[in-house]
Amino acid sequence: MAPLSIVQFTPFPWSEQGGLNDYTRRVSDELARRGHSVVIAAPSGGRGGVAETKEALSGLSDDPDALFAPGEEPRVLSMGGGVKIPRTGKRQAPVSVDMGKRIEALLGQGRFDIVHVHDPFVPGFSSNALRNSFSLNVGTFHETEERPFATQFARPLLEIFFGRLDARTVSSRASAKLLNRYFPGSYEITHPGVDPAAPAQTGEPPLRIAFSEREEPGALRLFLRALRRLPEELDWTASIYAEEPGEVQIRVAKAIRDRIKVIGPEQASLAELLSHTDVFVAASNGPRTDQAAVRQAIASGAVPVTTTISRYVELVGDGQRGLLFPAGDPVTLAGQIERLGRDDELREGLRKAGRSFEVETWPEVAGRFEEIYERLVARRHDPTGNVELRRKLRDRPLIDVDLHMHTDHSSDCATPVKVLIETARDRGFGAIAITDHNEVSGAQEAAKVAEGMDDFKIIVAEEVKTGEQGEVIGLFLKEKIPKGLSMAETVAEIKRQGGLVYVPHPFDRLHSVPDYENLLDMVEDIDLMEVFNPRVAISSFNEEAERFARKYNIIPAAGSDSHVAQGLGAVRNRLHDFDGPEEFLEAMREAEITRRHKNLVYVQALKFIQTTGRPKAAKREVDDPRAVRGGRRKARGSKRAAGKS
C-alpha cells in the first residue's frame, strides 16, 4: 500500500512507561519501519518538550508535512500539561488546559491520512483530538473497568465523539464486552503483541519468579507481601522488571531482599527476562494492567499467576494456562506461587498449555492496523473525477443552484410550484432541485413549466423517507420512489434511474437522519453531501457534515431546504452550467458555496402560517407569485383600505 501519514494520540504523559504507552510506541515503531510517516502526540508537563512542539507546529502552515522525515523513528510531540481528575482506582489522567490550541493546530494544519486515538473516552485530550480531526479516525479502547461518569452521566456527549470513529478496535475481549454494553457496535480485537521468544531456560531450582513494575504501585506492594509469606525452605529468586530500576523501592527483610533483584532495559528486555522465568506474577486490581507482559510470559514459557480481573482471566483461562488469585489477596498469591514451586508436573502442564495459545508479534499487530487503515483509505472517493469534462464545462457561464426545496406537493409546505419558480428566477437562480417529501409530482410539474425557459432549469428530485434509516434525496429522477424502503433499497433505486445520491442534513439530530453506521455502510454510494442547511438549528450539525464529506472526499453541496418562498437565497451553489447528472456532478466538484443566514424563527413562522394558518383549499389558490413575495405589502394595503371603508 502507499505510505500513509499517521498521528497516534495517547492520553497519558509519554514519561509514563508500559501499558497503553508501550502499546502505542510499539505499533508506531513498526508502522514507521513499514515506510509510513508517524508522529505520536501525548500530554507532557515538560517545558522543553512543549517548546520544541510549539516550534514544530509553527511551520505547519507553510509545510503541512514538516513533522515527517522519511525513514525516521516516530516523532513524539509534547502537547502540554493540565490539571488531573480521578480515574478508575487511584490512577489519574491529564485533562487538557493549554493543549487544546496545539491539538487544533496539529490537526488543522498538518496533513494526516489517519488519526489514531487510544482510549478515546479519556476526557480532555482524546476528545480534543476527535473534535478537531478532519481525517479518518481510528479508536483503540484499552480500558476494561467501567467509568460511571463516561457510561452514565456524559454518555450523550461521548456518543457524539464516538460517532466520529471510522474504525474501532479493542485490546481485549473484556474491553469489547464493556463497550458493547453501552455503545453497541463492531469492534476488532487488536491484542498487544509479543517479542519473539527463545525456548524457556527453566526447570531447575531455584524457582525463578518475575514481576513487571508497569502495573500500579499497589501491585508491587502486594507482590512483595506475598514473597514474605513463602516458606523459608522454598528455593526461589525474584526479578522485578522496571524502566527506571533506581526508582524502585524494595522494603522487605534482608533475608528476602537478597533473593530479589531489579532488572532494567540496559540489562535485558522483558522478553529476555521471561525466557529465563518459571512464574510471572501480574497483581493489578484494575487501574493499570499489563496485558502485554502476561502475553509475553505465556509466549516465553513462563506460567502466569494473575488476579481474577477480566482482562487477565481471558489470557490465562480458568486455570488452563496459569493460576489465579483474588485481587488484593497476598495469602492466596503466596499459596499459588508455592504450589507451582513444589509441583513440577503442574508447572510443566500449564507451560505446555500456553504453547497452544495464539499470540501475535508486534509486527503482526502493526500489520493488522495497516490493514484497517488501508480499508478506510480505500473507501475514500477519488477526487480526480472527469478532468476533461470539467475543462469543457469551464467555458460555460456560472449559474446559482439550490439543491433542496419544497412545494405544496409536500405535506408540510404551501408554496405553489409557480411561486417557487418565479421567486427563484427573481433571485437570480439558474436551476433548482425540487425535493418534495416522498413525491416527484411537484418537480415534474415544475419541469414542464420551465421547459420553455432558456435561463432556468429544474432538477427532478425527491426526498425519500426510508423505513428506519432516515431520509435521502435522489437527484435527476424519472419516477417516484416509494417511502418505507431500506436505505440500501432506496439508494439502489436512485442509481437504477440514473440519479445521484444526495444526503441532506446528515447529522441534524432534530431531523430523521441516517446514523453514522448507516453513512459508513453507504459511503461509496453517496454522490453529494449537504454540508450546509440554513434550517439546521445547531451549527455543529453542519460542521459534522462538512467533516464527514472532507474525510471521505465526498462532493460538498448545500440547499436551503426551503418550505416557504422567503427562504430562497439563504444558500447558493455557484457552478458552471450543466446538462444531466454527469455534467452536474463534475461542475459541483468546483462549485462555490455561498451562505447567507436567514432568521430561522422568521422562516419557520412563515412555514407554520402558510401550512397551518389557512385552510388547505386556500393554500392551493395562491398561484400568483406576487401574492406570496409581496404578501406583507398586500396585507398593509388591505388594512389601510379596510380603515377607509
Image: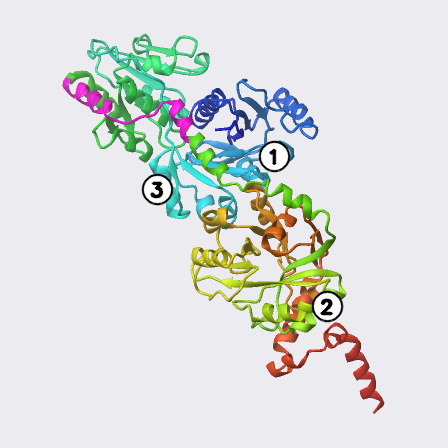
Span shown in magenta: 345-368
Q: Is 539 situated above or below 290?
A: below
| Mark 2 closeness class: few <14, some 14–19, many ≥20 residues within 10 Å | many
Within 10 Å of disc 1 (Cα), the crowding (few <14, some 14-19, many 20+) is: many
Residues at discs 1 and 2 in contact (Cβ within 8 Å): no
Judged by depth in the image, the label closer to the viewer, 1 or 2, is: 2
Judging by the rendered image, the residue that carries numbered circle 2 is: 423
Q: Which comes sooner in the sequence, label 3 or label 2? A: 3
Q: How many marks?
A: 3
Q: CA distance from mark 3 to mark 1?
A: 31 Å
Locate residue 550: give its quadrant: top right
Q: Nearer the viewer, residue 229 or 400?
A: 400
Q: Which residue is mark 1?
A: 107
In front of the other: label 3 or label 2? 2
Q: Where does the image place residue 196, in percent across and percent down from the top left?
A: 34, 17
Q: Residue at x 52, y 40 (%)?
A: 380
Residue type at mark 3 is Lys
Which residue is the site of mark 3?
Answer: 177
**How far apart in space, not on screen, are marks 1 and 2 (Cα)?**
43 Å
Q: In the figure, 354 relative to 484: above or below?
A: above
Give how far across and how far down residue 556 sits, in percent: 61, 49
Write the residue at 54% across / 59% down.
Answer: 474
